[in-house]
Each structure stands twice: as C-alpha cells, then as structure tokens.
Amino acid sequence: MEEGLFRMIAILVLAGISMAFTASRTASYRRALAEPVGTETCVACGESDMLESHPDAWTCTSCGYEQGPGWDRMRRERHIERLASMSPEEARAHALRLVGDARLSLRSALPALDRPIVWEGDHRNRHPELTSEILEAGQNLTRGFEAIREAASVDPEVGAALRESGIQTGSVPDFSLLYDVETAELGANTLRPHLAAVVDQLASASRTLGIEV
Ligand SMILES: [Zn+2]
C-alpha cells in the first residue's frame, strides 16, 4: 500500500502535473530569493552587521536574528549528533515516542484531505483557495513521515516492526501536490486511501512494539 502511495505520486508528477508545478516553484523561488539571504543585511532589523557564524549562516550583531540556509543544515547536524550520542535505551524510548507522534500527526491530517480547497469571491470572480487545514495537514504529513524515518534509523528493531507492518521507512514522500491549488484536490484524493492504510499500519506496529495507544 505504502509503495503504491509513492508510485502514485511519481506517476502524477510524471503525467504532466509538473507544468502546474513550475508556476508554484517559480513563485516559491521568488519568495525565497526576495529575502537577502546570504548577504550582509539583516531581514529582521535592517542593520547591516551580519556575522557569518557558519558556512551560509549569519547572525545579526544588533538583534541576534539568524538567517541563511546554513542554519537548517547546522540544526540538522546537531540533531543527528544528539541522536548519535543516545544510549540504546534512550534511542529505543525516543523511537517509540516518535512512532506515537507519527501516528497522531498522520491521523490528524486525514480530515483535511476531504476538503482541500474552498471557493472564494462573488459570481464573477470565483476562485479556489487552499484551506488552512490542508496546509497544516501537509506539514503534519511531512512531520509524521520524518518521525517514522527517524524512529527506524535510531532503533533497528523499531524499524523492523514498522516495515513488517508494511510501512516504508526509508524516505519521506513529497506532499507538494497539496500546496498547489491546481493539484490539491487530486493529491488529496490520491493520498486519502493510502494514508488511512498507513495509519492502520502504524496502529498495528504500535501494538507490536507495546506502545500505549
Ligand atoms: Zn538584526
């Protein structure tokens, strides 16, 4: 089932939805590049004294604001170091907590898939808009699948239990269809049955692992 989810998304993208994607990607690049990330100007206070704390990561000397793509990379690296320093017992407890979190995140995303867009405006100017719930659902889905991947990588037994339940633990699916008003309905309809299956599989894995649900 889970494999089907990945395949469906791949097929949808290959089927030509990439055309709609280009527009949204351009918009997001424009937003990202509008900020002077990587320059010496602070986007928070406008002061120009930015210190490079790490590669591609700057700190404002006036207000302390951190900007630049390097911060995300560094936070990820620190997180990985924290995980690596855990004892096996700590890693197990962390992995079990993540499985519980993943189940909550994925389950909470399900209702929003029933109504990803709303129609706004009057008769002449009616247009679809993404609901705030679907945007939140997209974040919860990403968070949930990231939790699954992390749980599987910090504790091999937890990873094995997840995979035995049918859950793919190796990668986080791309949910960008949900963030585009043109593709949100199609993406939500495609995702819904697969996601419901993953929620059931997580419940089954949780029972195997003795997680209170
Ligand atoms: Zn500043």
Image (cartoon, helix red, strand yellow):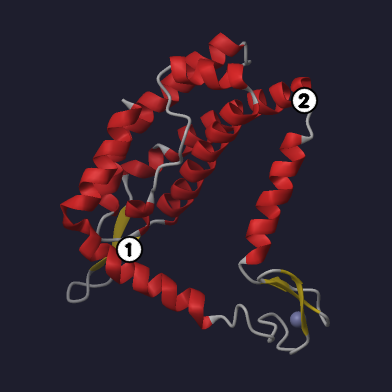
> Which of 143 and 72 lies nearest the eye of the viewer?
72
Q: With respect to residue 101, does 161 lie above or below?
A: above
Determine which quarter of the picture holds residue 124: bottom left
Circle 1 is placed at which residue position?
Answer: 129
Determine which quarter of the picture holds residue 201: top left
Circle 2 is placed at which residue position?
Answer: 90
Of labels 2 and 1, earlier in sequence is 2
Residue 99: image tag: none
Determine which quarter of the picture holds residue 171: top left
Point out the frontmost of discs 2 and 1: 2
Residue pushed farthest right?
Answer: 62
Q: CA distance from mark 2 to mark 1?
A: 44 Å
Which secondary structure lies at badge 1? strand
Who's the residue at 26% across and 50% down the image? 185
Q: Amino acid at mark 2?
A: Glu
Q: With respect to residue 130, does 144 lie above or below?
A: above
Instruction: Measuring from the top left, give residue 125's x and y in whole percent.
Output: 22, 75
Query: Are there few (<14), some (14-19), or many (20+) residues within 10 Å of tag 2?
Result: some
